[in-house]
Amino acid sequence: MHKQILRFQSEEEFQAFFSHLSSAEIQEFIPIEGAGGDQGFDGLSGKTAYQVYYPDPKNRTDKNYINKIDDSLNKIIVNKEKLGLEISEWIFVVQE
């Protein structure tokens, strides 16, 4: 099996790749556009929410990942009710 390493220049590029791949593979996938204004998630599929996170290499620390998870989960808890969504699963998507 051949392993290919993909390199992304920005979070936007990584998020676009994830959205295209997910749209092709997950029938019900709906990408949520707009980093920072995404209510704690970047895509939805049924009751599953996806959060994409691609920090700069120097910021890829356990502390930053934990802070992002805490921040995104808090946003999703608050905003799912405002948006009338039922979310039972949350998937955190990172580059590695």
Image (tube, rainbow, N blue to C red):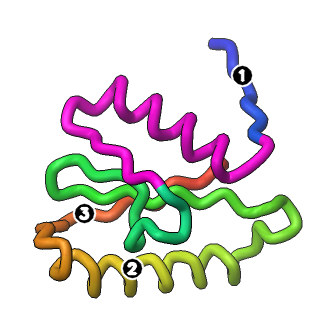
From the viewer's side, name the closer residue of 26 and 35: 35
Q: Which secondary structure type mostly characterizes the magenta part of the structure?
A: helix
| Mark 1–mark 3 distance (CA, rounded to whole Å) | 29 Å
**Which is more N-terminal, label 1 or label 2?**
1
Name the kind of residue labelled 3 in the image: Glu
Is 41 on the left-hand or right-hand side of 5? left
User: How busy is the neighbourhood of tag 1: few (under 14 within 10 Å), some, or many (20 plus)?
Assistant: few
From the viewer's side, name the closer residue of 95 and 22: 22
Residue on which disc 2 sits = 73
Please say if 55 is above or below 12: below
Name the kind of residue labelled 1 in the image: Gln
Could you tell me residue 51's position as x and y percent?
45, 60
Please say if 17 is above or below 87: above
Find out whether residue 25 is within the magenta segment: yes
Q: Nearer the viewer, mark 2 or mark 1?
A: 2
Which range of residues does the magenta coloring cover? 9-33
**Callout 2: helix, strand or loop?**
helix
Residue on which disc 3 sits = 89
How many circles with numbers are drawn on the protein? 3
User: How busy is the neighbourhood of tag 2: few (under 14 within 10 Å), some, or many (20 plus)?
Assistant: some
Is 57 on the left-hand or right-hand side of 72? right
Q: Quadrant of residue 73?
A: bottom left
- Whether pointer 1 and pointer 3 mark residues with C-beta atoms closer than 8 Å, the reply is no
**Callout 3: helix, strand or loop?**
strand
> For the point 27% across and 40% down, which residue is it?
29
Name the kind of residue labelled 2 in the image: Leu
> For the point 56% across and 35% down, which residue is it?
17
